[in-house]
Amino acid sequence: MKLMLCPFCYDVKKLIQEEERVCKCGKVKGQAVTSDNVRVSEKAVILGLNNYSLLDALTNYHSIGYEAGDNSTVDCWMFKHDYHKVERIGEE
Ligand SMILES: [Zn+2]
């Protein structure tokens, strides 16, 4: 899953195909074009959240109870600015 991080207000939005998402301060916006490609503002930072890692953590969270065990780690990375699955749109 791809998330859009605003470097100005640090808001994070999940990018979806159904609608364009805008950060809290309004300086960056973006939308998923396909299940794998996104179109975002020039300054947006794109984070990849590992779906399998998240599901593992959620399974663990539900199976051992919400207050038991240690905190779980979920894998996440930052895409390079010109990654081929990230299309940039100009500032308005
Ligand atoms: Zn913002």
Image (cartoon, rainbow, N blue to C red):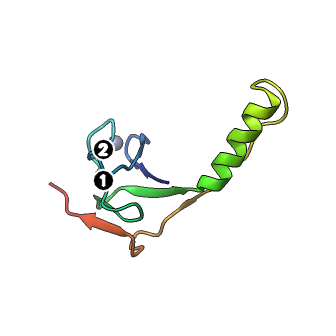
Which image quarter is the C terminus in? bottom left
Circle 2: element type: strand
> Tag 2 or tag 1, which sits nearer the N-term?
2
- Residue 73 image label: none
Real-space CA distance between mark 1 and mark 2, rounded to the nearest whole angstrom = 6 Å
Identity, as a three-letter code, of the amino acid under mark 1: Gln
Outermost residue, right side: 69
Q: Position of residue 53 (x, y in %)?
A: 67, 53
Residue lying at 38% horizontally and 73% vertically, measured from the top left: 82
Kindly tell me whether residue 74 is visible in this rendering: no
Residue lying at 42% horizontally and 64% vertically, measured from the top left: 36
Count of numbered marks: 2
Q: Quadrant of residue 61?
A: top right
Identity, as a three-letter code, of the amino acid under mark 2: Arg
From the viewer's perspective, is 36 left or right of 76?
Answer: left
Kindly tell me whether residue 78 is visible in this rendering: yes
The quarter of the image that holds ligand 1 is top left
Outermost residue, top side: 67
Viewer-closest of 28 and 1: 1
Is label 1 in contact with label 2 (beta carbons under 8 Å)? yes
Residue lying at 30% horizontally and 44% vertically, measured from the top left: 21
Compared with 80, 60 (above or below) is above
Circle 1: element type: strand
- Residue 21 image label: 2
Crowding near the residue tagged with mark 1, few <14, some 14–19, many ≥20 C-alpha atoms within 10 Å: many
Q: Position of residue 68 (x, y in %)?
A: 83, 27
* Residue on which the image places disc 1: 31
Q: Position of residue 90 (x, y in %)?
A: 20, 63
From the viewer's perspective, is 1 left or right of 31?
Answer: right
Residue lying at 26% horizontally and 47% vertically, measured from the top left: 20
